[in-house]
Amino acid sequence: MKSYKMLLEESNLKITPQRLAILKELDKKGHASIEEIYENIKEMFPSISLATIYKNINALKEENVINEVCLHQKPKFEITKEPHAHFICKKCGKIEDVEFSKVIDKEIEKYYPNSQKELYIYGICKDCSGNS
């Protein structure tokens, strides 16, 4: 993956410590809500407000640095990657990335060029089902 600074430079967003911390948190967690990001970075930035997190998340999202994963609960965010699906555990809410088949991607593009692809798979994760 590219460095956080490079992601911001390529998107023409100003490199700020807060944006770097948000990207680092998303990279560490994989998927996180605004509230989770806020809780985890407010120790580094005691004066940061939830509104500042919202503002930065929206700027990062508008520049396609991050994506919003639309869930039935609160939305979560992730650093933009290759197209992929999301497995969401119906019991604990954990989200896992699932490789998106190149065949499916090409088929969708053939009929719907330049479309945004989002695939959600719901089930019970290995941890909750007891299968290791």
Image (cartoon, grey):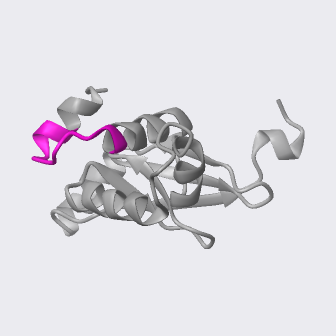
**Quick one: which residue is furthest to the front in this view?**
47
Instruction: Report x, y in % for residue 76.
Output: 51, 58
In the displayed structure, does residue 94 sit left or right of residue 74? right
Instruction: Report x, y in % for residue 94.
Output: 68, 50
> Looking at the image, which residue is at 54% across and 57% down?
33
Q: Above or below — where is 129 with respect to 72?
A: above
Q: Is residue 82 visible?
A: no
Residue nearer the viewer, 27 or 52: 52
Question: Which quadrant of the figure has residue 35?
Answer: bottom right
Instruction: Report x, y in % for residue 19.
Output: 32, 44
| Quarter of the image with the N terminus in it | top left
> Looking at the image, which residue is at 28% across and 32% down?
4
In the displayed structure, does residue 96 sit left or right of residue 126? left
Residue nearer the viewer, 66 or 130: 66
Q: Is residue 2 magenta?
A: no
Question: Which quadrant of the figure has residue 61?
Answer: bottom left
Q: Is residue 72 visible?
A: yes
In the displayed structure, does residue 18 sit left or right of residue 97? left
Q: Above or below — where is 62 with respect to 2?
A: below
| Quarter of the image with the C terminus in it | top right
Instruction: Report x, y in % for residue 64.
Output: 24, 54
Residue nearer the viewer, 87 or 112: 87
**Quick one: which residue is furthest to the bottom in this view?**
72
> Looking at the image, which residue is at 58% across and 43% down?
40
> Which range is magenta?
8-18
In the displayed structure, does residue 94 sit left or right of residue 114? right
Q: How many marks?
A: 0
Q: Is residue 17 magenta?
A: yes
